[in-house]
Image: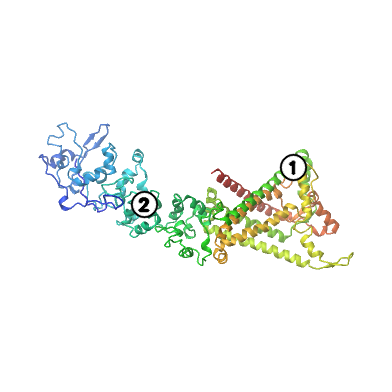
Amino acid sequence: MLLVILSIPLRAQDTQTTPPEAPKTTEITASEKPVIKEPTAPVTNEKCLECHGDKDLTKELPNGKEVSIFADEKILQSSIHGKLQCVQCHKDLTEKHPDDGKAPMAIDCASCHKNEGNVYNTSIHGASRAMGSSGAASCVDCHGKHDILTANNPNSPTFKLNLSRTCAKCHDNAGISEEYRMRFPDVATQYQDSIHGKAVMKMGLIIAPTCNDCHGVHDIKRSVDRSSPINQANLAKTCGKCHLGIEEKYEKSIHGMLLAKGDSRAPTCNDCHTAHQIETHTNTHFKQASDGRCGKCHEESLKHYRDTYHGKAMALGRPNVADDVAACYDCHGDHNILPVSNPASTLSKGNIKATCTKCHPGATEGFTQYAPHANPLDGKKYPALNLTFVLMTTLLLGVFTFFGAHTLMWLARSVWVYRHDSKAYRDSKFEIQRDDEWFTRFTPFDRFLHFLVVTSFLLLVITGMPLKFYYTEWAKTLFEIIGGAQAARALHRFGAMVTFLYFALHLFDLIKTCWTNRGSIRNPETGKIELRRFFGAIFGPDSMVPTMQDLREFVAHQKWFFGKGEKPQFDRWTYWEKFDYFAVFWGIFAIGLSGMIMWFPQFFTSFMPGWVINIALIVHSDEALLAAGFIFTVHFFNTHFRLEKFPMDNVIFSGRISKGEMLHERKRWYDRLVKEGTLDQHRVRDEWENWKNIARPVGFIFFGLGLVLLALIIYAMVTRLMH
């Protein structure tokens, strides 16, 4: 069989001399072209084809498998070796073949292609075969056998558009990849999906690089070999053959300078762009993966970048994330990364403002003081941020510890009472929920405001919590359902506007009430003018302002928990309801102000330092967690989970309370209304039956959604603690 490798002119950068210079090869001149020796035996091609021209001719291998040894004369004549005689490659065969019983020897392509043979012997393929690895690529694996064509022939397996498929015969072969423990077992498929592979194979751009442009031709070597064009020290120059100018920028960067010093930690092209899955930098996936690639070396910076909105949205990932989320290179640069102390750095004192304004038009000097990698645990470097973190953490732990204990004690006491007097408990529950007399507790305006509170709060939690718990799969799924960072941000801000709306409406109602009750009256006993109605609206029993009576009821309630006293009776509002009420005031102030700072950072940093954004993020995030956790646990128990209320208290939807419930829990209110003679003013018709079938399902949906969110939050926190 005729097996002679084609002589291919090699480029000037295919053989490495001494690093870190670019790989070099020796070009074959006219005088160095392969020397074709004349056959020494008078055996013609016609003689060979008398047998090998038979399509049915086969040969049995030692393993018992039969293979065809048919040689197609037309293919042979159309190849680059078409004018050669068979025996010029099959030198050991004589006119006595095959009757001499001698097995043909392997073809030695290097007998004609001496330079290529010498280079091949130093390659990973040649060295592997020399060590007995018969699966390593030989001349015929790349160039073919009788059908060898020039590399510029479109039908040649070494033609630019075909080369990746030729290499794929081994490098996409699962068996060979596993046997030889190849570092990139799916290299061919990865290349074909890369920007280089698409340019070559789908667009036919032969100027785009293929396998040999990076790895060499016959001198392919492992990346650890210092003479390899893909060795760490040489890779920038290899890529620079096509990407003119970028190599120069890289060499001047902090990464390039590290590499020049021989620091093995220095990242080079494939650390950021990968080896065979290279994609355009405008591709969203590239941007999404960039922070993780930078984080391989800058782990601490990545950790705290993920604490920012940009980092969380990037981790959640969406097709449109590249439009509005800053990646590492948006601030630090790409191939020109320099220390901040370097005046040429994009983050130097002279350039940082211009860098910020690329995404934040109107950014001020104060805005540039924002610290995107701030560590809240580092009190020495970030004292204000650390203090905020400590205070918010203390607030979280304090509230949940106190009210968690309060809830557990209440639940335990309720269960004890139920077990020891279940009939009385059931009867009281029946009286509370079934009665003929009903009284107004919440006006339609109150119920409308509560509806705004519930809907806006759930919307804020649904669109905000995925950012806080970005590392969970449920957060990514929820963000996917919402529509990504842009949609979530728009919905979150809409929820914030609804929050500001109901807060403003409530304040207006409070002011109106106080104004209505501003009149003064004369005390008949003292004759003095007193603003009873005005102060009564603020501090009276119908007010949400805490009084000493609330403290006395709190103490009495704790005694009842431990069986040390009677269960206290309450007026219109209980101490825990007043806490909930003022918690909303505090929450709207804390969450609202911090949210506004993050919403309009350019405005606030025009008169405040940029690190207030870092503080705002901690306050906003932790206060939101406090609000969600408190509402879905403590508030839900106080309102719905108590045995006498389970599964849900309808009062906020119906606005009405039964006489039985007033006597069971709010007897002080009932007695006060009777004494004042205003009980009938609160009496209402039982119109609840007409629309409860609508209100209840809505209430259960809100209620159930809150419980689902609570479960997801707990799961996310437990997951974080475990890791």
SS class of the residue under badge 1?
helix
Q: Quadrant of residue 535?
A: bottom right
Q: Position of residue 368 (x, y in %)?
A: 51, 62
Q: Which one is nearer the viewer's eye here, 177 or 247?
A: 247
Where 501 falls versus 623 (above or below)?
Answer: below
In the rendered structure, which amino acid carries the disc numbered 2?
Answer: Lys
Residue 533 relative to residue 506: left or right: right
The residue at which mark 1 appears reads as 413
The residue at which mark 2 appears reads as 261
- Label 1: few (<14), some or many (≥20) within 10 Å? some
Q: Quadrant of residue 93?
A: top left
3D distance between C-alphas at marks 2 and 1: 72 Å
- Which-is-in-front pick, marks 2 and 1? 2
Q: Which one is nearer the viewer's eye here, 676 or 579?
A: 579
Q: Which one is nearer the viewer's eye here, 559 or 365?
A: 365
SS class of the residue under badge 2?
loop
Q: Position of residue 223 (x, y in %)?
A: 33, 46
Query: Residue placed at 16% from the left, 31% from the top?
Result: 101
Residue extending farthest to the right is 525
Query: Residue placed at 17% from the left, 42% from the top?
Result: 89
